[in-house]
Amino acid sequence: MNKLKKVYEAVCRVEEALAGFLLVVILVLVFAAAVGRTFGHPISWAMDMSVFLFAWTVFFSADVAMRKDKHVNVDFLVSKLPEKVQYYLKVVNYLIIDAFIAFLIVYGIPLSYFTRFRTFQGIPGFSYMWATLSLPVGGGLLLISSIIKTRQIIRDKPSTHAVKTMPKNMG
Amino acid sequence: SAPRYVLRFNHVLAPTHPYHAGFEKWAQRVYERTNGGLQVLVFHSAQLGVEEDILEQIRQGVPVGQNTDAARLGNYVPGIAVLNAPYFVNSIEEVVKLNKLPIIQQWETELAEKYGFKVLSFNWVQGYRHFMTNKLVKTPEDLKGLRIRTPPAPIWQESIRALGAVPTALNFGEVYTAIQQGAIDGAELVYDNITGANLFEVLDYVIETKHFLLVNFEVISSKWFNSLPKEYQRILEEECDRAGLETSYEIERNTEEIKKYVQEKGMKIITDIDMEAFKKAGEGAYKALNLMGVRDEVMKQMQAIE
Amino acid sequence: MTLVFILFGIFLILGMPVAFAIGIAGFVFFLQQPHLPLTLPVQLILSETQNFNLLAIPMFVFAGNLMNETGITQRLMRFASVLTGHMYGGLAQVSVVLSTLMGGVTGSSIADASMEARILGPTMTEKGYNRGYTAAVHAFSSLITIAIPPGIGLVLYGSIGEVSVGRLFAGGLVPGLLMALFFGITVSITSRKKGYLPEREKRAPLKEILPEFAHSLWAILFPFLLIFALRFGWLVPSEAGAFASVYALVVGIVAYRELKWDNFKRCVKSTIADIGMIMFLIALSALVSYGLKWEMIPQQLTQALLGISSSPSVIFALILVFLLILGMFIDSTVIILLLTAILVPIARQLGLDLVYFGVIMVITCATGLLTPPVGLTMYAVCSIMECSVADFMKEGWPFLVSLIIVIALIVLFPQLILFVPNLLFGT
Ligand code: NA
Ligand code: NA
């Protein structure tokens, strides 16, 4: 069990590093494309490549944000309810979220295969499938985080359950 | 009562484009002939989504339709791209003829059976595309080094490169400022585009190269199409073809007025160009994309029906 | 779609993260439509990430975070202090000026308000400022950052509504400065009453101001460089975002020499978390947007609204009141995401300039960030300042009044918004 936990932690670190790396690559690519065009050497594949990488960045980052509790919620009403009710609400919320993410994966895999013929207009022969895959793959990691969270919430008995989650970085 | 069948039809053009009125006419006639049983809702300006996404939705069986081109369908059936190569089709009459060729019908069958696209019509013609620049161009050599905006698909890019220019992919909406500020040196477009985006303010010349006759495909989901009653299927196709041809001729007539208008706005239309040189240069695109064989086959079939 | 909106409301109230609340509610639309395959919602979520224009958002978020890591914040704060130290409520004035200066770096109200509440808040409490008052000053002044370019709200509005982001950025400049002016006046009046004294006796001499100005120059220059880059068509918005990040990197490494590998890594990490939050929300909102388009709700609403009154001003006023009320309950990003596609055609029909409308829409929606029951910026500062929402409102109302005056001014005098974009981009 401990070993599994270590493996998962390693995966999380790789995921975060990869997302960061992709972000920097996108930055370089978009910047280079603008400079290139200005000097008469447009990079025809830059736009498509940057959005392709962006898909992976977004879904990896969504998982990072979930692990860091960054997904904003509104609790002005919930926080006024009895703790026991809050507990059950939270459990239900997360069970619904788990189911939704699972759905994204279950339908994302066949969709990835289905989109194999579509290619990026600017990158001849490069299948759109590789972009579509970002959703089931990122979704898989998201589901693990979400299930871990659900388990924590269920274990947190109402009496010890603290109201937290303050929104950050939005607006 | 509510219509039994509803098709949502998307296109990326402005509501003022003649195509939009054409699609509305089609929708109207289908509605009347099916006594309100089949309704086509037209979405202009890509209101339902971007073209590539709608094409994928069509493949998934969603009851939507899209006005698209050979370059995009060439992603699925590569040979189709040839219709988007330089100097391949040269008049509306030729388009009508093309429709009857076995090879085109074979492509349509492949699109339907393998990829789920039903081609309702292939005779919506937007007109000739020309180079529009600030430099006087008469030969392919004159285009050398000019950054010309064109769609990002390989067939467009290779064609523009073959004709002598540096193809530059950019959203159409950004063309005006990009030309104004010298990020690009021109574009290759149809006459309608000039007035649509006030490009006469930033461009001096229309070089009438006529390098493509832009023909569109109207596609919907074959799965959904097959679920329609036979009668409805026939009406939907017939009316789409009819409205397409009417619209194509209307655009051809309008072009003369637009020409006058852009000249009043100060643009010069250049017709005394070395057309043979352009046609010869255009060959390069067929070679680069391995389309020589397909071209010869289509030409052979064209001659056979004459 | 009715069910979708009801569910969205319920999920929100029950404390589900906003991104999932909107995604799951939107998903229900596809369950209601038997002829829509369930692979479609997955495709739509993915497609949202394939929009090159939206890349501007991560790029600007990255740029803002990089600027912070370069130590620009400290420099701007020193500059703001020498400028306003002699005024009543000196530290509160610093907050207003700092937000104005930070406006050119960040495009997010919550980030700005939380940052300033953390840095300035404790000192202000020590010096006897009421906690609610401090929270209100930071929260309200943070709205300035939304209007002064770059701003995420304006980028979103521009890319959904197909309105020039360069013009929108230019259009936000004067409203941002107007807010700064009005909040500054409000601070002066309220501080005098409450006896919040100046930090120093006399106005700082020029020889003290100038060096601080020089230290902050890179950040102050930035919004202007940005507008010019967009104006001259060198860059499209996403490229401008990339340019902003590169600019921040160069300033951090070459000019300030404070950006090292460690804080660069930290900065990338926090950017990833920010992007994950905002982009996931944007991606999942695609489901509701598609439902709206599918049902042709924008077209229907346009018809309905235009039927209410023949006077464009009445309809425009109705829209603003509607946005103001909606903003109290729903986050401004979500409103912009869902309503831009609906409201832009209406604005066009009413004959309104789309830049004018966009700037007003973004500021109006953002007002909701500061009002109960759901005001994310308000929550953030209240929790940092450890004050109640009631205290916040009790101390904050003069600021709310001046904010509404600013909105009224820009609504009534369109030139306040349009003068700069028309001057730079032509009419
Ligand atoms: Na502030
Ligand atoms: Na800003």
Image (cartoon, coloured by chain):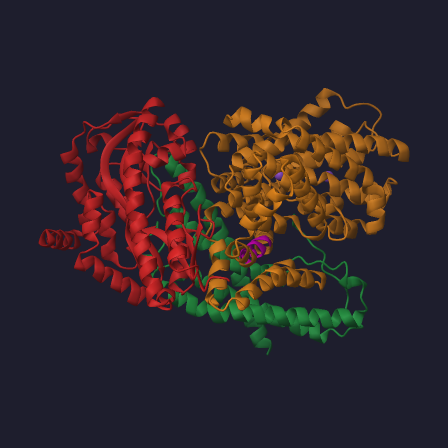
Chain colours: A green, B red, C orange
Where residue B301 appears, as percent x and y from the top left, is: 12, 55
Q: Horizontal placement of C81 versus B280: left or right?
A: right
Among the 4 quarters of the image, the one containing residue C13? bottom right
Q: Nearer the viewer, residue A137 or C11?
A: C11
Examine the residues drawn in magenta and state their main secondary structure: helix
Q: Residue at x 49, y 42 (%)?
A: C238
Outermost top residue: C206
Queried whether the magenta region covers residue A17, the answer comes back as no
Please provide the residue range marked out in magenta: C278-286
Where residue C182 appears, as percent x and y from the top left, is: 75, 31
Q: Is residue B146 visible?
A: no
Placement of B30 over or under B263, stated as above or below: below
Where residue B20 appears, as percent x and y from the top left, is: 40, 45
Placement of C392 over or under B37, stated as above or below: above
Q: Nearer the viewer, residue B16 or A152?
A: B16
Instruction: Tell which quarter ligand 1 is in.
Output: top right
Among the 4 quarters of the image, the one containing residue C3? bottom right
Where residue B189 appears, as percent x and y from the top left, is: 32, 37
Q: Nearer the viewer, residue B167 or C271?
A: B167
Q: Is residue C300 visible?
A: yes
Quadrant holding the N terminus of chain A: bottom right
Q: Residue at x 59, y 68 (%)?
A: A145
| Circle count | 0
Q: Nearer the viewer, residue A49 or C140?
A: C140
Placement of B76 over or under B125, stated as above or below: below
Outermost bottom residue: A1
Q: Horizontal placement of C49 versus B190: left or right?
A: right
Q: Horizontal placement of B71 versus C92: left or right?
A: left
